[in-house]
Image (spheres, rainbow, N blue to C red):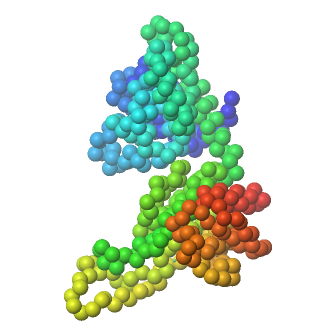
């Protein structure tokens, strides 16, 4: 049996679908809350035929979310926030219908939508008639969901409400509690569990007028890969990203910004953090007083753009003080004398480590899939071979984990 102490402070989003086993979910809520977890519930229309919203509300001591189209629910707690503000989504009972909709990626009610929108682990506790469970369609749906990482507890074998015998009974509440605790325990063993990392990625866009901006060629591939790699090692990651074409990496909270000043504000709002990795290509300058109307060719020649310096996010996060992350890692994008310039940058910006890369034309570092980096620390330089940006990220995350293991 997993250690239940691990449930304290965890946030579970419980989806209750329509099945006779829904009554057991009330007990599940009680058992989770007794162990210190917070439970927020989504009740499907069919679920509300088996348990009353009032009972669920009384047991969770929270609003019961039921309707994708509820203006009140959406304004107070959008469905995306609902699924992201949980550590785990549990579907109990998971009916054949809901499993089929999950497998098909449907978003036709609130339950299916939060399950599609989530970036958190999902546990299902199937409950249905034995023939429905054994049907090739349900088995194929379940196999597909499991291949995508959805976890399962049960179903158990026994006499069903319809008097048939076989697998289909929902796992007992305490079995579901054990399965939930086991999922959290897996994460607790990861080397960066309990650490918070802030990662910047991508370019910034600095407006000239409402339609034009100053930008650079960063694709966000390197920064996003670092965010994903840190999350994979158990860190809670806030990724502050400039405009990119990339999907949000799994397991990260992503804050989308456009300008350097917005990036700084988002990073500061994300503190406290143990780790900061600044991989974004932040514009050093912005237009001083961008026009609020589109600049016109009026025959008077091109407009003179006065530039002013942007705040330096890396230098700000590195500043000594209570809120300084224990480990601040910067990047240095150079086009010559890479090691000398990057070493000087580390000292000037007061970060702990700097990852230097050559961004000269022809290297493909900006926008490409591979990178050749040098990790510069106080005690020396490590030059890594050229490798995919994902591999650079994984190696950097391992070095970060090693740093905290040695503390
Ligand atoms: O996004 P990709 O296409 O995958 O490309 C990856 C990358 C080349 C963008 C990345 O590997 C990289 O080098 N990122 C840093 C780019 C950069 O702006 O370097 P810099 O040498 O100008 O800045 C030094 C450091 O200060 C960086 O950590 C940067 O994030 C930070 N900085 C710079 C200016 C500023 N106003 N605020 C900052 O925080």
Depicted 283 relative to depicted 21: above or below: below
Q: Quadrant of residue 183?
A: top right
**Residue drawn 47% across and 6% down?**
163
Number of residue marks: 0
State the residue at coordinates (65%, 61%).
387
Q: Residue 372, how many percent across, how many down?
A: 65, 68
Q: In this view, does 344 lie to the left or right of 220?
A: right
Q: Quadrant of the N terminus?
A: top right
Ligand 1 location (quadrant): bottom right
Residue placed at 69% from the left, 71% from the top?
374
Q: Which residue lies furthest to the top in this view?
A: 163
* Residue in the foreground of this view, choosing between 295 and 312: 295
Instruction: Specify whether residue 326 is in view.
Output: no
To which quarter of the image does residue 385 belong? Answer: bottom right
Q: Which quadrant of the figure contains the C terminus?
A: bottom right
| 283 vs 373, nearest the viewer | 373
Q: Which residue lies furthest to the front in this view?
A: 362
Residue 76 is situated, as x and y percent measured from the top left of the image, at: 35, 49
Q: Furthest residue to the left?
A: 298
Question: In this rendering, would 305 be left or right of 247?
Answer: left
């Amino acid at each position: 049996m997993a250690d239940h102490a691990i449930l304290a402070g965890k946030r579970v989003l419980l989806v209750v679908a329509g099945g006779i086993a829904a009554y057991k979910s009330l007990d599940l809520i009680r058992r989770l809350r007794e162990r210190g977890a917070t439970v927020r519930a989504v009740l499907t229309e069919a679920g509300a035929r088996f348990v009353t919203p009032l009972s669920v509300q009384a047991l969770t001591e929270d609003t019961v979310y039921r309707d994708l189209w509820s203006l009140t629910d959406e304004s107070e707690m959008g469905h995306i926030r609902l699924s992201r503000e949980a550590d785990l989504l549990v579907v109990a009972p998971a009916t054949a219908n809901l499993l089929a909709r999950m497998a098909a990626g449907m978003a036709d009610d609130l339950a299916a939508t939060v399950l599609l929108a989530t970036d958190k682990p999902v546990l299902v506790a199937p409950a249905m008639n034995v023939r429905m469970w054994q049907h090739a369609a349900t088995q194929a749906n379940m196999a597909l969901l499991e291949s995508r990482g959805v976890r399962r507890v049960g179903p158990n074998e026994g006499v069903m409400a319809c008097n048939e015998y076989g697998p289909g009974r929902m796992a007992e509440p305490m079995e579901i509690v054990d399965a939930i605790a086991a999922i959290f325990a897996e994460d607790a063993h990861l080397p960066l569990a309990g650490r918070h990392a802030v990662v910047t990625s991508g370019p910034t866009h600095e407006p000239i007028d409402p339609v034009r901006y100053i930008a650079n060629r960063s694709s966000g591939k390197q920064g996003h890969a670092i965010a994903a790699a840190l999350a994979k090692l158990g860190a809670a990651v806030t990724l502050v990203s400039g405009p990119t074409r990339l999907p949000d990496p799994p397991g990260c909270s992503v804050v989308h910004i456009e300008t350097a000043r917005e990036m700084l504000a988002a990073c500061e709002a994300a503190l406290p953090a143990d780790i900061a990795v600044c991989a974004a290509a932040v514009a050093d300058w912005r237009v001083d007083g961008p026009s609020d109307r589109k600049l016109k060719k009026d025959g008077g020649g091109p407009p003179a753009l006065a530039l002013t310096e942007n705040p330096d996010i890396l230098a700000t996060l590195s500043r000594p003080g209570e809120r300084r992350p224990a480990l601040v890692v910067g990047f240095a994008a150079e086009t010559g004398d890479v090691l000398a310039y990057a070493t000087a940058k580390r000292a000037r910006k007061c970060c702990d480590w700097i990852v230097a890369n050559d961004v000269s034309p022809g290297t493909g570092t900006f926008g490409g899939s591979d990178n050749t980096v040098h990790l510069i620390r106080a005690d020396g330089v490590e030059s890594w071979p050229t490798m995919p940006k994902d591999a650079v990220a994984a190696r950097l995350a391992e070095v970060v984990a090693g740093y905290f293991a040695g503390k």
